[in-house]
Amino acid sequence: MSDALTRLAAADPYARASYALDVDRVVDRVTRVAPREKTPWRRFQLRVSAAVGTSALVTLGAISAIQGVGSTLPVLNFAAAVTRSAFTTTEPFKSAVVATGSNVSTAYFRASPTLSSAPTQGAAYQLNAPAIPGGEAARLASIFEVRGPVRTKSNHTVWRVRDASATCTYFNLALPSWRYARFSSPTSVPGASFRSVRALETNARDLASRLGYGYQLGSPRVSFATSSVPTTRVNFPVVVGGVVTNLTLTFSYDARGVLVGASGPAFQVARTYLYPLVSARGGVARLNAAGQLTHPTSSTGAAGLVSSTHTLRRVTLSLEAVRLRSGALWLVPIYTYAGGPHARNPSWSVVALASRYARHVTGVNPTPLTQR
Amino acid sequence: MALSREEHFGRLVRELSPAIGAYLGRRLYPLPRGDLDDLVEETLTVLWRRLADVPPDAELPWALGVARNVLRNAQRAYRRRENYEGQLRERAAAASAEDVYLADEGIRDALARLSDDDREILLLHAWDGLNADALARTLLISPNAAAVRLSRAQSRFKEHLAEVIVP
């Protein structure tokens, strides 16, 4: 093969990507519609029924899209949590019931009477990563106006476009993410004198909307850093379906209002499912179960191991990104409990899905979830 | 023992859907994964309806031929929408799918200079791995015509690439 054709073959963006679908599900869906011969009478019937049914289908479709069908809600086999602080690493769940927080294993939790005992519902989201990593890097680079070829490294997990003044990187990792960094601040930027915080927020929102990922942004938190280069950082919590997630979108500006850095997650919501959740009090029981399960040799239960007892008074529902054992990326509802009214009080988190829809893994041995 | 119709279809889906997804994904990027899944499923639905017509010795070329038609329909629908939206607002010229994601600028420019027919047969061969016989099945032309068209497309591509490299 000539050099030109070798280069052409190497330029295939799907050469190292793979397209996979849920074969059984697709086969089931496609084959359920049996082929029928379309006679003129049949076509007429179809047109009439289509006209009559359209409005009903639109309504039903919208409802079923978000609710799924109760009996067909996927059971989630958890494999690992994506860390809150870094997009680039993963860490295994520490316990069989996916509880995080300080000293879960040595604490006993008591539910305040203010916590509800009524089961509720909450949405979980199946996410899609960008299909072609190199293409995603190129798309992001065009948004941030970084011009250059896409290069990859680290076993095709890092895809980068770089020019004389900035880099734009797409990380094809457990939680797909992107990062923009400007390392050569221009000496003069038209219109880039001092910009108010509100102007920076507006600019950040505009950039975020151009990313096209489809998730929403919560209220921004603005912070100022004066270490080496004074920067203003605008942090947006990522919001999906009106619920805040553990993910953030960050934009950093220098003193003249020039964007010098940005980062965030890269995903699209593929499907939405409405799951039954345990009650807030049920979540507390699950926390206690976590403490017990981290000490499987104990025969006395969590109470026999406790070094402290916490009364949990507040609970918030949020979404957290997780990888399932199948490799699928999801946002799942999480309860986060706190004992005291202040932000500095310790907090503890558990998956809020009803037990029958969640399977958790400790090490290599899958452990069915048991709710006390 | 002969496979049932459902089992036959299940085997085809398992074996062909990665290639169908890759074929459509290459040509429609950036397309949200959900939309790509829809197009793959549309292709598979045609496969299911016409399962008896799938030639056992050319399943992939036949399936890619179906995907090609699905792709054209999707592109027609996209253009209709774009035309409609274009009446409402000014829009920057959109880059082709290849333009957007090709990292090798020389390759990108050389491809852009090819005709649609040349680019299609060249990429079906280079990226989707179809030989002349399979190209013939996909494009509904004779194997001889496919070989000639591919050879000419390759020659023109090399010429364009040389022009890109030498300023």
Image (cartoon, rainbow, N blue to C red):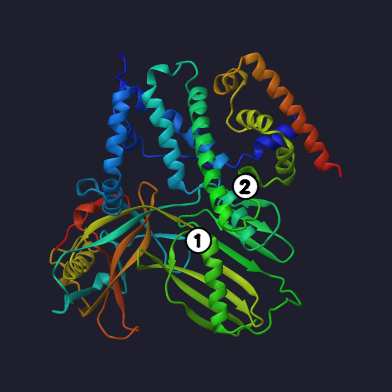
Q: CA distance from mark 2 to mark 1?
A: 23 Å
Where is residue B114, by image quadrant?
A: top right
Task: Find residue B56 and report its horizontal and vertical position in percent.
Answer: 45, 16
Q: Chain of mark 1?
A: A
Residue highlighted by disc 2? B101
* Quarter of the image with the N terminus of chain A in it: top right
Mark 2 or mark 1, which is nearer to you? 2
From the viewer's side, name the closer residue of A70 and A292.
A70
Residue highlighted by disc 1? A88
Residue type at numbered disc 2: Tyr
Task: Find residue A347 and report its horizontal and vertical position in percent.
Answer: 30, 76
Q: Chain of mark 2?
A: B
Kindly tell me whether residue A74 is visible in this rendering.
no
Q: Is residue B141 above or below residue A359?
A: above
Residue type at numbered disc 1: Thr
Q: Residue at x 57, y 64 (%)?
A: A179
Q: Is residue A216 left or right of residue A261?
A: left
Kindly tell me whether residue B140 is visible in this rendering.
yes
